[in-house]
Image (cartoon, grey):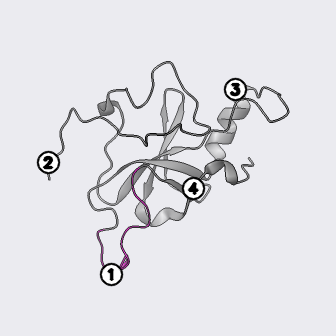
């Protein structure tokens, strides 16, 4: 399979709950700036909670950054070519797909700093569960 070097990241056609919107929208950003996962790895954008609480308090940027680093849920942005291809390990097929929210262990994967936060590079077997809405999970740090 040949990948086009000019391909764009296609995020789900819905608002990314809790993901901080930067001046440059990630969906419009040139996808060559993000790493392309190889083998059985996947690129995950950790969940970032809202900047304002239900009670109307604005959270400090350092609090939001700490929470994102400690987050255990994220959005699958890209998957490597060998993700979930091993029929012996995954006889029922893939556990998740691009555009879905997943849960992973606190220290799972490699952390990569990007503008506006960080992304994680996880192995396909580090996904613990899928979730419909990451706001349903209590995020503590």
Give the image location of residue 132, x and y in percent.
Answer: 57, 55
Q: Which residues are magenta?
A: 85-98
For residue 51, side relative to residue 128 (left or right): right
Give the image location of residue 138, x and y in percent.
Answer: 73, 52
Which quadrant of the structure image shows residue 85?
Answer: bottom left
For residue 106, side relative to residue 141 (left or right): left
Answer with mark 4 or mark 2, whichever residue precedes in sequence.
2
How far apart marks 4 and 1 lie (CA) works out to 27 Å
The answer to whether mark 3 and mark 2 are in CB contact below 8 A is: no
**Residue, disc 2:** 2
How far apart marks 4 and 3 lie (CA) works out to 26 Å
Which quadrant of the structure image shows residue 29?
Answer: top left
**Residue, disc 4:** 132
Answer with mark 4 or mark 3, whichever residue precedes in sequence.
3
SS at circle 1:
loop
The answer to whether mark 4 and mark 2 are in CB contact below 8 A is: no
Q: Where 18 sits versus 116, above or below?
A: below
How far apart marks 3 and 1 lie (CA) works out to 44 Å
Q: Which residue is farthest right? A: 55
Q: Which mark is residue 88?
A: 1
For residue 71, side relative to residue 21 (left or right): right
Q: Is 95 included in the stretch rendered in magenta?
A: yes
Give the image location of residue 98, x and y in percent.
Answer: 39, 52
């Amino acid at each position: 399979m040949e990948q086009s070097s000019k391909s764009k990241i296609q995020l789900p056609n819905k608002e990314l709950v809790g993901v901080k919107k930067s001046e440059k929208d990630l969906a419009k950003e040139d996808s060559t700036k993000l790493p392309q996962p190889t083998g059985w790895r996947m690129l995950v954008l950790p969940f970032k909670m809202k900047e304002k609480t239900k009670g109307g308090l604005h959270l400090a940027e350092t609090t939001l950054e700490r929470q994102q680093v400690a987050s255990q849920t994220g959005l699958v942005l890209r998957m490597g070519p060998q993700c979930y291809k091993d029929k012996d390990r995954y006889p029922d097929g893939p556990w998740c797909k691009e555009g879905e929210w997943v849960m992973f262990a606190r220290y799972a994967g490699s952390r990569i700093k990007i503008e506006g936060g960080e992304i994680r590079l996880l192995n396909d077997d580090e996904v613990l569960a899928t979730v419909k809405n990451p706001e349903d999970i209590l995020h503590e740090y």
